[in-house]
Image (cartoon, rainbow, N blue to C red):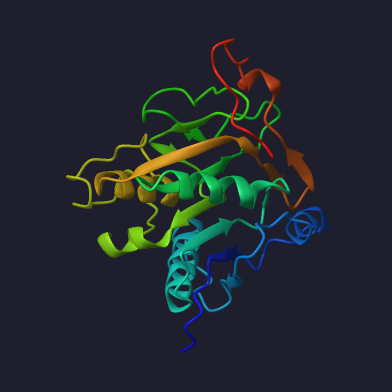
Amino acid sequence: MSGVHTHIAIGIPHCSRRPLLLDWMFKLLTQNWPVGINLAWIGVNDDNLPDDMPPGDRISALRVGIVAAAKELRAKFLWMIDDDTEPPVHAARYLLRTLESHPEAAICAGIYGTKEPDPQPLVWRRVGESPATFHPGEVFPCEVIGAGCMMIRMSVFNSLPLPYFRFRDADCTSNAYESRVTFSDRQGEDAYFCEKVRRAGHLVLAHGGVLATHWDTEKRIPYRLPEMVKVPLPAHVSEVPLA
């Protein structure tokens, strides 16, 4: 095996029933990558998964497969980009710079909203509260954030047991978190992962300068967070540099 390590592995979990949009592909092709680092692409689809596998289990299996591939590449960071989540062109630089500046953090993720006319941000400062509001460019700790635009420090997996991702319904029995369902009555695979990372003693960060578009790929409708989510910065707070 070569002595050259991959700095960022880009993992795309693709559901074969979902069309890929040109807007999404264009944003990946025009991404403003950090200069001088090694990149590797990981595409995992669900062609080999059972047709009757529930959607939550399907995406969980794809994410676990991506992690395994990133380990083979000896990647330092893994950036998961869902096939319905369009990152801004500066996303890779901002997420990477934040993780490199905060060694205590295992995750830094961009923020995107629900697929509805008035989207709500899929990030929670504390589980059980309303979705977070945040200042433009603010980087803040959170307990749960969506995994559709999530950069992960690969070393975190050295301290996590499998499964890394798991979709849990209210009637699931699990002792993973002291037999309690902590995220409403249903826990998505991204919430499960965030909680697992936090319980291992690592920080989860949300980046208010990386706002992604969430697509309804069937209807080709983009959902972007409304301005009301991003409250103005107080005069004494400095915005995170965006250059």
Q: Which of 45 and 76 is in front in this view?
A: 76
Task: Name the residue at the bottom extreme.
Answer: 1
Task: Name the residue at the front extreme.
Answer: 36
Q: Residue at x 47, y 48 (%)?
A: 99
Residue 177's x, y, as percent?
A: 22, 46
Residue 137's x, y, as percent?
A: 61, 30
229 in relation to 161, above or below: above
Residue 43's x, y, as percent?
A: 60, 72
Residue 63's x, y, as percent?
A: 47, 63
Q: Residue at x 46, y 31 (%)?
A: 140
Q: Which residue is drawn at 35% across and 42% down?
A: 203
* Count of marks, rendered view: 0
Quadrant that contains the C terminus: top right
Q: Which residue is drawn at 63% across and 25% down?
A: 136
Q: Is residue 164 shown to the viewer in this render?
A: yes
Q: Is residue 113 shown to the viewer in this render?
A: no
Q: Nearer the viewer, residue 86 or 186?
A: 86
